[in-house]
Amino acid sequence: MIKRSLLLLAGVMATVPVLAGSAKAASDGAAIYNANCSVCHQAGGVGMPGQFPVLKGRIDKIASSPEGKTYLADVVLNGLHGPIQAGGVTYAGFMPSLKTLSDDDISAVLTYVASLGDTKPAPSFTADDIKTARATPKKGAELQAERNALNAAHPIP
């Protein structure tokens, strides 16, 4: 009985590093958001009035179209500089590029933030969505033009 228990325990212990590695490798959008985005956009994506736009209840609506998903991926990868209208408020801020994050991490963050809205099911992002956006980096004027085109087709909340 003791030998069987030790064998079972050894088997369980042998799988712990594998399970820990899998759990670590799996992207946790909320944790990645909290580590990289919440300083500005605050916990739960509630924003900071006059300084950083609210994400909660907006990102899901923007991500509801393919163009919106592309725009959001482009913003996270390339950053955003200059004045924008968001939720009826003008922001003249600076969002840094988060391109150093992996495609999996960025897709997890965007999926998490999209889940904070009322759209059900919430739009989701894949690592392939981010990989595609990463293949075509955009500069400030290009990103602003993309935002204007998106806003004309599907008003950005």
Image (tube, rainbow, N blue to C red):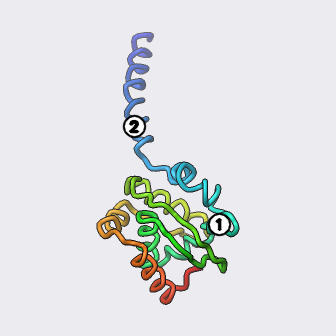
Relative to 102, residue 11 above or below: above
Give the mark toward the camera: 1 or 2: 1
Check disc 1 and report the residue beneath it.
51
Q: CA distance from mark 1 to mark 2?
A: 38 Å
Q: Is residue 93 above or below residue 152?
A: above
Q: Give the amino acid type for the residue marked by disc 1 in the picture.
A: Gln
Locate residue 21: give its quadrant. Answer: top left
Secondary structure category for the residue under label 1? loop
* Identity, as a three-letter code, of the amino acid under mark 2: Gly
Q: Are marks 1 and 2 in contact (CB under 8 Å)?
A: no
User: Measured along the vertical axis of the image, is residue 35 above or below residue 5?
Assistant: below
Label 2 packing within 10 angstroms: few (<14), some (14-19), many (20+): few
Q: Which mark is residue 123?
A: none
Direction from residue 6 to residue 113 in the image, left or right: right
Closer to us: 32 or 146: 146
Q: Nearer the viewer, residue 4 or 108?
A: 108
Which quarter of the figure has residue 66? Answer: bottom left
Quadrant in the picture for the C terminus: bottom right
- Residue named by callout 2: 21
Q: Residue 82: x percent and y percent?
A: 53, 73
Closest to the observer, 52 or 127? 52
